[in-house]
Image: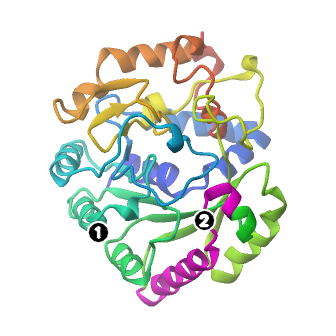
Amino acid sequence: MTLKAILSNLILSRLDIARIKRILGDTPVLSVFFKLISQSLIDREYPTHLFLETTRACNLHCKSCPRSILTSGYGHMNFDLFKKIIDEAGLFGRRNFCLHMLGEPLMHPEIIKLVGYIKSSPVRHAILLTTNGYFLDAPKAKALIENRVDKIVVSIFSLRKDRLNSLTGNTDITKVVDNISSAAMLNKQLSGKTNIYIRFLLHPENQDELESVSALAKRIGVHLEVRATHNYSGLITDNSSKEVTPGKRYPCYHPWFSPAITWDGKVVLCCNDWNYSEILGDATKDTVANIWQGSRIKELRKLHLKGRYDEINLCKACNVWSLYPDIFFKMQKS
């Protein structure tokens, strides 16, 4: 495995990026090195990190999600398309895969088969699986750990049933906590290498629960990641992301690292493109490499570096960029 592949996996699939952003903000010297390392990982031939929407199905109705007004249809990614994407990725070396976009990946009827296929590649791709935890029962957790999933992230909004119902439309937090505990225990029993996280999603309604969620993670023996909810391109205004003045905006990392492929094969700019507003191509008809090397993504990168976000419908009101560190130097932006 190359040093580039190791660093890519570490930064994109293992580290708590919100914590890294805070550290870099406090230590300007480290920020320089982070920018240099991050830029060295950019691959203009094929994405370093891919979001694969294995399914658009979900069992929750979260306030912070645009699913309630989706017009782009629902379904599961079929295995032939999935295989085509993974096989092509292997030609470019080790890659990082997130298996979600706007759905709950564990609701895909063949999710273990999909995970197993990624891990069967001789280039040792990395997998980050984000889930709401309701379907992370012991058999699934065992299969995921045995298939060497690199990171499992369980997103939690609240430990209070009334508040959870308000934020997600579900009250069964006991089931989620039990599933996380079981997964952590199995990981230990199986001597697994899977990193298990609780991701506490900050929202204006739940910020008084940080201490109790932190205590839960410590008691169970898993990592804690705290992340602000974002606005899905300006659609969701009731979120916890801090307001950032336009003059301080910097390019998002997605156009250089992380496009998304929807369940039906559309390659979109990022995992927050909830209604296909910035389609780069179609993975059912073209290769991901051709799409990633295409004219539209090159134009989007130029617009980001020039600060012309208003010319991109998906990006102009988005605040996702603020959740990640700036990877470019001032002299590179114009």
> Residue placed at 46% from the left, 86% from the top?
186
Q: Secondary structure at mark 1?
A: helix
> Residue placed at 36% from the left, 25% from the top?
279
Between 30 and 150, the residue placed more toward the observer is 150
> In the image, 38: left or right of 26?
left
User: Hey, which quadrant is residue 117 in on the image?
Assistant: bottom left
Q: Position of residue 31 (x, y in %)?
A: 67, 37
Q: Secondary structure at mark 2?
A: loop
Between 284 and 51, the residue placed more toward the observer is 284
User: Hey, which quadrant is residue 299 in on the image?
Assistant: top left
> In the image, 147: left or right of 163?
left
Q: Position of residue 185 (x, y in %)?
A: 52, 87
Q: Looking at the picture, which amino acid does disc 2 mark?
A: Asn
The answer to whether residue 159 of the structure is visible from this angle is no
The residue segment tinted magenta is: 165-190
Q: Which residue is mark 2?
A: 170
